[in-house]
Image (cartoon, grey):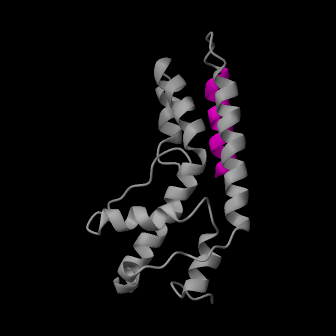
Amino acid sequence: MKTLVINVTLLILVGCVSKVDKLSYLETWNDKWQECDKVGKETTIVFPQSDWFKSLTLDNKRKVFLYIHFLKDYECTQEEAEKLKSVLSEYDITTLNEVLKGFIYFDMPSNVDVKHLDEQQLIFLSNQILGPFNAITTAEAMGLIKHE
């Protein structure tokens, strides 16, 4: 899927000639998200705990966990993504914007599943995690999922 997104994106950009080297922005973002993806796959963390988090239902713990996981993926590439979005917007390259929309390393994750929870507590937990992490191994260690 990731390779398909990049290949489609490259085809679109190659066809869009302008003074700004859009391809370099895409390559920079692509390199960064691949680096972040690698770090995420290799990193198991001890997820921060708080009385608030411990008091949540298992379902809400999972929602908080996933939201923070996706947030850390996004934050890892946020600077490069914002630069690429700016160039795409400036030159009205909407096709590429649509291809990348919703990709975890390109857009801020939706908070719809955690909107009903304490935002300050979410921020507190999130701020204790420095970067991307392996969701499966971390969730297993926390007892949020069972490996079968």
Say if the magenta span includes residue 3.
yes
Percent position of residue 96, x then y: 54, 32
Number of labels in the image equals 0
Name which residue lies at 63% across and 66% down: 133
> Up-down: is 43 above or below 100?
below
Residue 143 vertical position relative to residue 33 in the rendered view, above or below = below
Residue at the extreme left: 116
Residue drawn at the location 52% of the way across and 39% of the way down: 99
**What residue appears at the point 35 percent right and 79 percent down from the top-left corner?**
52
Image check: 109 left or right of 39?
Answer: left
**Residue 96 painted magenta:** no
Write the start and end of the magenta stretch as one range: 1-14
Q: Residue furthest top?
A: 19
Counting from the top left corner in percent of width and height, residue 103 is at 53, 48
The percent position of residue 4, horizontal first and vertical second, equals 66, 45
Residue 97: x and y in percent read 49, 33
Looking at the image, which residue is at 66% across and 47% down? 33
Does residue 106 show up? yes
What is the quadrant of the C terminus in the image? bottom right
Which quadrant holds residue 83? top right
Residue 84: quadrant of the picture: top right
Classify 127 as above or below 102.
below
State the predominant SS element of the stretch in magenta. helix
Residue 113 seen in the figure: no
Image-based side of 75 in relation to 108, left or right:
right
In this rendered view, identify the residue nearer to me: 1 or 26: 26
Q: Is residue 11 above or below residue 59?
A: above
When asked about the image quadrant of residue 45, the answer is bottom right
